[in-house]
Amino acid sequence: YYLVDIPIFYISTNKMNRIVAALALLFSGVSAFAPTPTITRGTVQVKASTEGMPGIVAPTGLFDPVGLAAKATDARLKYFRESELKHGRVAMLASLGFVVGEKFHPLFNGAIDEPSYIAFQATPLQKLWPFVLTAIGTVEYISIDKFNAPAEGFWTLKAEYENGDLGFDPLGLKPTDPEKLKTMQTKEIQNGRLAMLGIAGMVAQELVTGGKL
């Protein structure tokens, strides 16, 4: 919590709005590392419920050794799950590309014959970083409407948002049965977790050996 001693009775409404906005920007960067308090309504504390969440499987059950879920509200827990899904999906694509790219690289006339961890530097694509960052920024900008307003809590997602739902299912694979959907979501999360460990291991191996997998 942050306490700021400002004589508000001498400050106009416009100035107050600017001060609040500035403080929000100032502290938003560190809020991600600060403990998230539970929301108190009267005398009742509203904590996150992990019951029935996809990805909680035997033998570990809810694996939360540092107690992040215990300290989080539902909205904050949604943010954690969204982060896990996004990183898992990126890691699955990266793991596949990391392996395939070393065996089959048709671009640039097949002249790229480097370990995957430095393959990008061996191409002329380094000059396209502004376009890459713009594309990433566009995707992140579109996701802003999933978040609650800062007044409702930093880094929290709206209750009506369904984690991982991008509205993209061209093959119609999403089950309509709730149990089958939960099973599919659990499989995606589990594969994403494995991929995050896998890509980290592959990069570490090539950094140590300097060669291909």
Image (cartoon, rainbow, N blue to C red):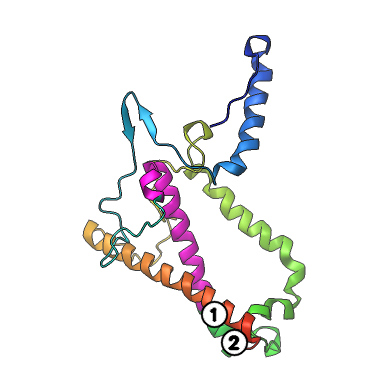
The picture quadrant where one finds residue 26 is: top right
Give the Cα separation between the discs numbered 1 and 2.
12 Å
The answer to whether residue 61 is above or below residue 31 is below
Q: Is residue 84 magenta?
A: yes
Judging depth in this view, the residue of 176 and 127 nearest the camera is 127
In the rendered structure, which amino acid carries the disc numbered 2? Glu
Disc nearest the viewer among 1 and 2: 1
Compared across the picture, whether 70 is left or right of 121 comes to left
Q: Which residues are magenta?
A: 68-95
Callout 2: SS: helix
Which residue is denoted by mark 2 in the rendering? 102
The picture quadrant where one finds residue 123 is: bottom right
Q: Magenta span: helix, strand or loop, mainly?
A: helix
Q: Is residue 79 magenta?
A: yes
Which residue is denoted by mark 1 in the rendering? 202
What residue occupies the far front of the structure in this picture?
66
x 69%, y 76%: residue = 120
x 67%, y 25%: residue = 18
Pointer 1 or 2: first along the chain: 2
Callout 1: SS: helix
The answer to whether residue 122 is above or below residue 110 is above
- x, y (%) of residue 36? 46, 40
x 30%, y 54%: residue = 53
**In this view of the protein, can residue 3 be seen by the observer?**
yes
